[in-house]
Amino acid sequence: MTKNGDDLSPETRAEDILLGSLGYGEEARVLSLERTKNGYRGVGKWPDGEQFTFENDDELGDLEIWALDLLTVRQRA
């Protein structure tokens, strides 16, 4: 699958939005995610299995809010 944006699932797009806004590459994936007072934090993983933590307390834009809503609902399901 190519990553041109047209063939990505909504979940993959959401992960790319949230992690990309923090400077992580498109290969990184979200393992866990939670809302914070002003933003979000969680644990991500690289394709080689290495895990990392991330956090964003900056003001969220509409795309980041959409992505956060989508991924936090997915975790509860």
Image: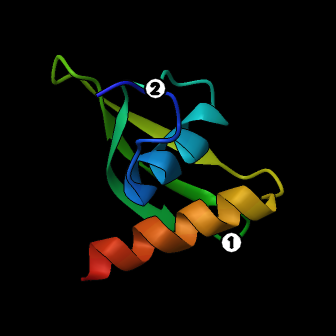
Of the numbered discs 1 and 2, the one sitting upstream in the chain is 2
Nearer to the camera, 20 or 56 = 20
Tag 1 secondary structure = loop
Residue drawn at (41%, 38%) of the image: 53
Near mark 1 (Cα within 10 A), the count class, few <14, some 14-19 or many ≥20, is few
Colouring rule applied to residues = rainbow
For marks 1 and 2, give the one nearer the viewer. Answer: 2
Q: Residue furthest left?
A: 49
Disc 1: which residue: 37
Q: Residue furthest front?
A: 6
Near mark 2 (Cα within 10 A), the count class, few <14, some 14-19 or many ≥20, is some
Q: Is 55 positioned to the left or the right of 42 in the image?
A: right
Query: Residue 74: percent from the left, percent from the top?
Result: 33, 73
Q: Residue furthest top?
A: 48
Q: Is residue 57 above or below residue 62?
A: above
Q: Is 22 positioned to the left or the right of 76 in the image?
A: right
Residue drawn at (43%, 27%) of the image: 3
Task: Residue 47: name its quadrant.
Answer: top left
Disc 2: which residue: 26
Query: Residue 16: percent from the left, percent from the top?
Result: 51, 39
Q: Which part of the image, by quadrant, shows the N terminus? A: top left
Q: Which part of the image, by quadrant, shows the C terminus? A: bottom left
Tag 2 secondary structure = loop
**Amino acid type, mark 1:** Lys
**Amino acid type, mark 2:** Glu
**In 3D space, how far apart are the residues under numbered discs 1 and 2 (Cα atoms)?**
26 Å
Residue drawn at (68%, 66%) of the image: 65
